[in-house]
Amino acid sequence: MMKLTIVSGPETGKVFTQTQDTFSIGRGEECEVVLRDSTVSRRHCTIQRSGQQQFSLSDLYSPNGTFLNDPKTPVQTRKLYNGDQIILGNSSLRVELLEEKQTGQDSDSGSDEKQVLSDDRKLPKNWQSGMTVVARRPRLPSPEAAKQSSGKEQTGVLSGLKRFLSTVFSFFRR
């Protein structure tokens, strides 16, 4: 299992815990690790498990390149070690290789939670290895709500315009 912590960039402090064998990092929503950094490609790089506690980083031919520990030397494929720093655009991620947890029944089977996350949230008992912990993103207003609010503004603007025009026309009718 691997933990990635953003140590610099637009989302400093955000933590991603990955248990998958292969996952992608980038700006696009299809990536498992999404970075809100305009200098990062939509699909910038991948990390792939190559053995027990062994991972490798591969650049996906991103225009700005992928760097490991040294911002001057781009890498195409490189083995990752605990404490490595992945540099993508303006963002830097610190790599922490974690020991695999057994997903069998715990000794206290009466508890509903299995594992505690770093921000006091708990994983449900039915959580299995390979599942990804997803950080919540702020909700955007639904398209219907946006239409309703813009419709109200237009109604207010239109009614104000109608009053203005009726005043102007009544002035010229005299």
Image (cartoon, rainbow, N blue to C red):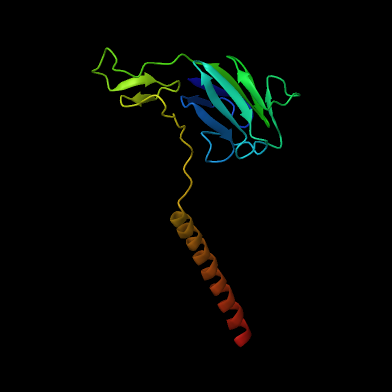
Q: Estimate the x, y position of residue 62 in percent, counting from the top left.
A: 67, 36
Q: Residue furthest left?
A: 110
Please state which of residues 7 and 43 is positioned toward the viewer in this rendering: 43
Q: Nearer the viewer, residue 170 or 25?
A: 25
Viewport quadrant of the C terminus: bottom right
Label tally: 0
Quarter-wise, where is residue 50 in the image?
Answer: top right
- Left or right of 123: which side holds 107? left
Q: Is residue 37 above or below residue 165?
A: above
> Which residue lies at the image location 43% right of the left edge and 16% below the top edge?
100
Answer above or below: position of 172 versus 108. Answer: below
Q: Nearer the viewer, residue 52 or 42?
A: 52
Q: Is residue 174 visible?
A: no
**x, y (%) of residue 12?**
59, 27
Q: Extreme right residue here?
A: 72
User: Residue 25, percent across and down?
Assistant: 57, 32
Q: Residue furthest front?
A: 51
* Residue 67, visible in the rendered structure: yes
Q: Could you say where residue 61 lies in the image, as x and y percent from the top left?
A: 67, 35
Q: Residue at x 62, y 17 (%)?
A: 84
Residue beneath the point at 57% across and 71% down: 161
